[in-house]
């Protein structure tokens, strides 16, 4: 009956017992010991660090759960508009340290863990990274969840619970990348809450039969049905009780096995169908900036968008509102084109299940979705073959054709548009062909960016330059069609909680004590760092600042010594390039620069060499097979120059295997200078550039992505820019194509470096011919054109570093001016300019 009394039993008993762990050490040890005994069924004897970590994590989780429950109840009661961040990648890294800091319980847990005979620092190292992403795009999603919770915004993330995250990278002695699976769930994951009761059926294949003429309903039947089961991950805000949710879907066979096959005695067939259902969420595709066209990837995308939309609609329906109010209560952010199927899926639900008129449904859809583009590189723009889509998602293919037909004739005032086009560009069929959702060819392909663009209310890029490029290149026709106001920019950001307070605790402490404000204040208003500028003139402050950088360098050296066995020279300048390997990111330019430096050092007399500023160069990053050779070259250059007695005190080089969020947390605070050297116009934003600068590392880079805005904020005198600018890039490529100049003429120092490689200075030169030839021929990413100015920029870095006082001033002024790059600013921008969302603080009314 609807008259049941909730809660059942004695309400005061419920209320007094609904609490987390008290913030005192006694309660904390009690809770940890209790988890050891009950949740883990272990004892104090033989309890290892892993067990102690798990018990500590469960104890912290208890605390978060209270806030999480309260937040969800509060949101339900207040019924505000909510936003949903759909991302195929969430690169979360570790959780325990971050949770302790956001809950402000770190020092109490440190003491409690100590009393139990363990060290919190050791326990933190036991946690495996949640590495459900490739790089910047996935890490951005993680930063945005932190900022949403920290600013009390009702935002949920939706993603997939991959059984295996990004592969683990091993480097063979020859310098080859080897890949091992990442079984991150093997030790149990204390941070996820399985919600077996929250599940949806998702259909694939089958037949779609139109029920009426025109753009009407259809009946989609048959095929394969797979179950999506929810796993919830709590996202605690910093210094607030608001705790949001990240819901990850796992795929399961709808039945344990296929009954028909089983009854027919076809045991193998029965198991196969259950295997293929589980396969959907088994592994993260490790492709960054490339598309594969693989069936399983398309199934992942649909599985995830269908389950997420079903869940969003169910929650909306609980409000008891009419469906036409959907856009007043729901905003859905599409993180790149990966979730674009959500657009035809919502159309399907509204038309086939809710029985809405086509135009009405389209109006709802185009008011709910928002689309972020993260790259203009053509190889990253998703296209799906029509035959594959027709096979897996027959109903969605019909809807896409309907959108295409209608968009060319009817809605968006298309008639007016077509008339205007006719007037302006008589008979411009090419324009229509470019804008079509379907690319002609064999096979025909669905252009996901076009679909995301016409199905969304607003579209944004991720840095000023990138957003301009989106509007003037890949989506130019759509800007002319819809008007420019549909297009915007939200420059990326990073969470200062993880990327300063957590990864650089000493610097965080120095900032709080210098500014005389609690860290909870400046961590949530990063512009407050501006006041550090005036301390740049203070000698004592500079000494403390420099000492912290030095200790962070020693922390990194210690990490390398214990994990890899190398002894790193901590008196040298630390120069870091860490990111996915890709031709456009130009790790080749960096390694060629290292070789150039090595050859110059060799040519010096010992006396002159002593005047050279010692430098250690670090690389890290995972690669797709196309870029294995670059790693191999780096490793073999390292092997040669680290062993050269004449030069090794002045230049050494390390490739650190298996780059991860946790490794970044050790590397970034230790850097003096970091490299962000993409060919101008190719790196949409970059976010590690922001992390280095926030930690007082300076930046050598091209005039690209967010580098430009960083320089605007910190002052160009504090950034080492080089290279050709975006407008020149196209002309240079044209020249390479039609008036090629051999490298020997275009850039003799580079030609010399390439010849040394081919000549076998770093082992069999033949191995590197394909790599070297990308530069000798075509040189699409303009390594030759930028080489001289790159070398000059590095010389300026050396010169600046010699005046250490000036350098430290630059470092301080850089950190001080990074306020803009907090992901809090970025998320507030989305909330206000895109989603129309209000903060809903828990416990403040
Ligand atoms: C990256 C961009 O390259 C980077 O510049 C940006 O800072 C980051 O996104 C966050 O906005 C991208 N990652 C991917 C990954 C895939 C496809 C496209 C991009 S763009 C799989």
Image: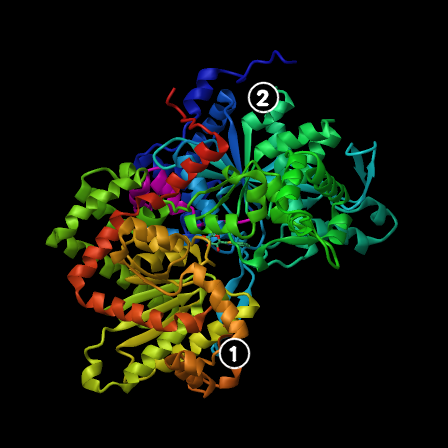
Seen from this angle, which residue lies furthest top? 3
The residue where tag 1 is placed is: 773
Quadrant position of the C terminus in the picture: top left
Would residue 672 appear left or right of 3 to someone viewing this image? Answer: left
Residue 44, percent across and down?
A: 40, 48
The residue where tag 2 is placed is: 319
Residue 626, percent across and down?
A: 56, 69
Would residue 177 appear left or right of 652 to someone viewing this image? Answer: right
* Magenta stretch, residue numbers: 88-116
Residue at 46% x, 69% y is: 782
Q: Nearer the viewer, mark 1 or mark 2?
A: 1
**Number of numbered tags placed on the structure image:** 2
Seen from this angle, which residue lies furthest left? 539
Residue at 40% x, 70% y is: 786
Cβ atoms at labels 1 and 2 below 8 Å apart: no
Precedes in sequence: disc 1 or disc 2: 2
Q: Is residue 118 visible?
A: no
Residue 417, percent across and down?
A: 64, 38
Give yes or no for residue 93 being in the magenta stretch: yes
Helix, strand or loop at disc 1? helix
Residue at 42% x, 82% y is: 745
Q: Is residue 646 visible?
A: yes
The one nearer the camera, 467 or 685, is 467
């Amino acid at each position: 009956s609807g008259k049941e009394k909730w809660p059942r039993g004695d309400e005061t008993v419920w209320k007094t017992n609904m609490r987390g762990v008290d913030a005192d050490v006694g309660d904390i040890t009690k809770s940890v010991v209790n988890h050891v005994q009950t949740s883990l069924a272990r004892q104090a004897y033989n309890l290892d660090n892993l067990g102690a970590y798990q018990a500590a994590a469960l104890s912290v989780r208890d605390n978060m759960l209270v806030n999480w429950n309260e937040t969800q109840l509060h949101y339900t009661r207040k019924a505000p508009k909510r936003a949903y961040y759909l991302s195929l990648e969430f690169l979360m890294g570790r959780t325990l340290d971050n949770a302790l800091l956001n809950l402000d319980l770190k020092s109490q847990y440190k003491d409690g863990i100590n009393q139990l005979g363990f060290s919190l620092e050791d326990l933190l190292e036991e946690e495996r990274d949640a590495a459900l992403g490739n790089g910047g795009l996935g890490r951005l999603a993680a930063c945005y969840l932190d900022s949403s919770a920290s600013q009390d915004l009702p935002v949920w993330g939706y993603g997939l619970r991959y059984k295996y995250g990004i592969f683990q990278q091993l480097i063979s002695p020859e310098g080859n990348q080897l890949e091992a699976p990442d079984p991150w769930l093997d030790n149990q994951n204390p941070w996820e809450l399985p919600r077996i009761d929250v599940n949806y059926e998702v259909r694939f294949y089958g037949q779609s039969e139109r029920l009426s003429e025109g753009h009407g309903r259809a009946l989609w039947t048959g095929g394969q049905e797979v179950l999506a089961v929810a796993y919830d991950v709590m996202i605690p805000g910093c210094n607030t009780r608001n705790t949001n949710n990240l819901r990850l879907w796992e795929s399961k066979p709808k039945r344990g096995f296929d009954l028909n096959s089983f009854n027919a005695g076809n045991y193998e067939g029965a198991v196969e169908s259950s295997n293929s259902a589980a396969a959907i969420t088994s592994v993260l595709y490790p492709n960054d900036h490339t598309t594969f066209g693989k069936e399983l990837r398309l199934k992942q995308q649909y599985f995830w968008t269908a389950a997420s939309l079903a869940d969003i609609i169910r929650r909306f329906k609980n409000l008891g509102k009419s469906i036409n109010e959907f856009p007043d209560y729901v905003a859905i952010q599409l993180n790149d084109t990966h979730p674009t199927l959500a657009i035809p899926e919502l159309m399907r639900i509204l038309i086939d299940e809710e029985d809405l008129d086509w135009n009405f449904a389209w109006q709802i859809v185009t008011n709910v979705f928002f689309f972020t583009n993260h790259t203009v590189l053509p190889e990253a723009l998703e296209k799906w073959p029509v035959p594959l889509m027709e096979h897996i998602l027959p109903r969605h293919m019909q809807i896409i054709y309907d959108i295409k037909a209608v968009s060319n004739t009817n809605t968006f005032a298309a008639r007016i548009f077509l008339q205007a086009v006719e007037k302006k560009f008589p008979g411009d069929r090419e324009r229509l062909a470019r804008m079509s959702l379907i690319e002609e060819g064999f096979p025909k392909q669905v252009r996901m960016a076009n679909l995301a663009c016409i199905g969304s209310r607003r579209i944004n890029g991720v840095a000023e330059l990138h957003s301009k490029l989106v509007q003037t290149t890949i989506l130019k026709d759509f800007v002319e069609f819809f008007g420019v106001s549909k297009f915007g920019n939200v420059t990326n950001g990073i969470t200062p909680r993880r990327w300063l307070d957590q990864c650089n605790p000493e610097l965080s402490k120095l900032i709080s004590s210098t500014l005389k404000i609690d860290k909870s204040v400046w961590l949530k208003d990063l512009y407050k760092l501006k006041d550090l500028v005036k301390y740049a003139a203070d000698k004592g402050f500079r000494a403390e600042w420099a000492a912290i950088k030095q200790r962070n360098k020693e922390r990194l050296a210690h990490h390398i010594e214990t994990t890899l066995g190398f002894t790193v020279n901590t008196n040298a300048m630390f120069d870091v390039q860490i990111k996915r390997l890709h031709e456009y990111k130009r790790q080749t330019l960096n390694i060629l620069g290292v070789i150039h430096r090595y050859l110059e050092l060799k040519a010096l007399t010992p006396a002159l060499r002593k005047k050279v500023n010692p430098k250690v160069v670090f690389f890290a990053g995972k690669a797709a097979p196309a870029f294995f050779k670059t790693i191999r070259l780096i490793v073999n250059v390292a092997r040669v120059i680290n062993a050269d007695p004449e030069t090794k005190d002045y230049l050494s080089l390390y490739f650190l295997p298996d780059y991860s969020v946790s490794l970044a947390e050790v590397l970034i605070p230790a850097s003096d200078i970091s490299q962000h050297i993409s060919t101008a116009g190719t790196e949409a934003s970059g976010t590690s550039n922001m992390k280095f600068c926030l930690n007082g590392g300076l930046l050598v880079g091209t005039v690209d992505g967010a580098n430009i805005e960083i320089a605007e904020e910190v002052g160009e005198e504090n950034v080492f820019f080089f290279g050709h600018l975006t407008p020149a890039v196209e002309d240079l490529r044209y020249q390479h194509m039609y008036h090629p100049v051999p490298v020997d003429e275009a850039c003799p120092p580079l030609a010399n470096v390439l010849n040394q490689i081919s000549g076998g200075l770093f082992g069999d030169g033949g191995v590197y011919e394909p790599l070297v030839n990308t530069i000798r021929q075509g040189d699409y990413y303009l390594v030759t054109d930028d080489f001289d100015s790159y070398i000059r920029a590095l010389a300026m870095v050396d010169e600046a570093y010699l005046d250490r006082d000036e350098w430290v001033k630059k470092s301080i002024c850089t950190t001080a001016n990074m306020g803009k790059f907090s992901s809090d600013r970025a998320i507030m921008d989305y909330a206000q300019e895109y989603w129309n969302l209000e903060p809903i603080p828990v416990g403040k009314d």
